[in-house]
Image (cartoon, rainbow, N blue to C red):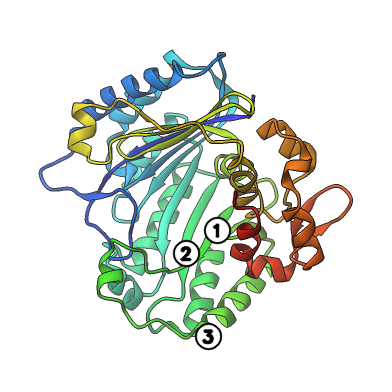
Amino acid sequence: MPPLSLYIHFPWCIQKCPYCDFNSHAVKTGIPEMQYVDALLADLQADLALLTVPRSIGSIFMGGGTPSLFSAAALQCLLDGIKQQVNLQSDCEITLEANPGTFESAKFQAFRELGINRLSIGIQSFNDRHLKKLGRVHNASEAIKAVNIATQAGFTNVNLDLMFGLPAQTLNEALLDVNTALSLQPTHVSFYQLTLEPNTYFYKFPPKLPEDDAIYALQKASQQLLDEHGYQQYEISAYAKPGFQCRHNRNYWEFGDYLGIGAGAHGKISRILPDDIIRTAKPKSPEQYLKNYTAIVSEPISQAQLPLEFVMNHLRLKTGFSLNDYQNMTGLEPSSLEPALSQCIDASLLINDGQRFFCSEQGWDFLDEILEKFMP
């Protein structure tokens, strides 16, 4: 069986950001913490029943929304309940997403004492003008203070989220954001471009973004700066110090399995390869989820879809994949990747070094074109 992770979705935020297309909802009358924890634990029990054999969890990711709005007491009940139902590996990576503005020293000290060993902090920018335009509830000084609180609380594995291509953003402003992040010495940086996603305020009322050439230039300059400071790019938008790549996200990209609990959460479970790989989805509305958390189990992923599903994830990684990876994760023969694989190599979009297949520099910029060739 592939490695197994657990994703837990927390759907509440202080307010909804205009660029956000995640399943998040502004807090209006308080959060029903313990009711939600009870639903999560019942949801997990139902998902575990879908497994064909008992399996241990290698990583947990608490995302949102803003999970750090929950109290340490509620998260302790949640983690204790999880441990009663499923075995956690001794080195299990447990990540909590947090936003500046929800940081209190005592609270984050308590989070660390619960066994949460990785924080992912949604900074986005250290520029107050850009933060205001993005609808963030914090300013630059609060962002810096949040990272310092995390360090003082004992977190030694911290990711900072940064955006580029912001409205009216200049090259110098982007580089200043990266330099400020580097000065705080995180172990991991998620550096991704602002995109205007459907069903967001920005999509309906689009801000004026920099020209494509300007965005590309500031992206390349920022990537060079990250590289010079020892942050290795291992995925399209992920940069890490050696030994600090995100295990949870790597499991997604390596086509591993994951249980998804919480409002709007999705999961992927391999039961029998290649005939029985299923995806699960939960009700998106927090109110509906609390009334009925029952999983909506989709149709199994068809064998015709598996080649695309596999390469779509693996080619996000700089290391790509081996044919052994493909066979082990899908149960299919390597020949099922043809003729698309050979076509991509002939077009210099993919490179085969004798062991692994990965994107060329050209292929990295034209990933959609590669994926089209693997469509069933």
Residue lying at 27% horizontally and 25% vertically, measured from the top left: 39
Name the foreground residue: 2 vs 173: 2
Residue lying at 51% horizontally and 52% vertically, measured from the top left: 159
Q: Nearer the viewer, mark 1 or mark 3?
A: 3
**Image height of 271 relative to 156, above or below:** above
Dot label at residue 214 = 3
Residue under label 2: 162
Percent of width and height locating residue 30: 14, 41
Local packing at callout 3 (Cα closer than 10 Å; few below 14, some 14-19, many 20+) is some
Occupied quadrant, residue 122:
bottom left
Residue under label 1: 189
Percent of width and height locating residue 371: 62, 57
SS label for mark 3: helix
Occupied quadrant, residue 169:
bottom left
Give the distance between the C-alpha atoms of the residues marked 1 and 3, in whole angstroms. Answer: 21 Å
Q: The N terminus appears in which quarter of the rendering? A: top right
Q: Is residue 31 left or right of residue 281?
A: left
Pointer 3 or 2: first along the chain: 2
Labels 2 & 1 near each other (Cβ < 8 A): yes
Percent of width and height locating residue 281: 37, 35
Percent of width and height locating residue 28: 12, 48
Give the distance between the C-alpha atoms of the residues marked 2 and 1, in whole angstroms. Answer: 7 Å
Pointer 2 or 1: first along the chain: 2
Q: Which three-letter amino acid code belongs to the residue tagged 2? A: Leu
SS label for mark 1: strand
Local packing at callout 1 (Cα closer than 10 Å; few below 14, some 14-19, many 20+) is many
Name the foreground residue: 179 vs 78: 78
Labels 3 & 2 near each other (Cβ < 8 A): no
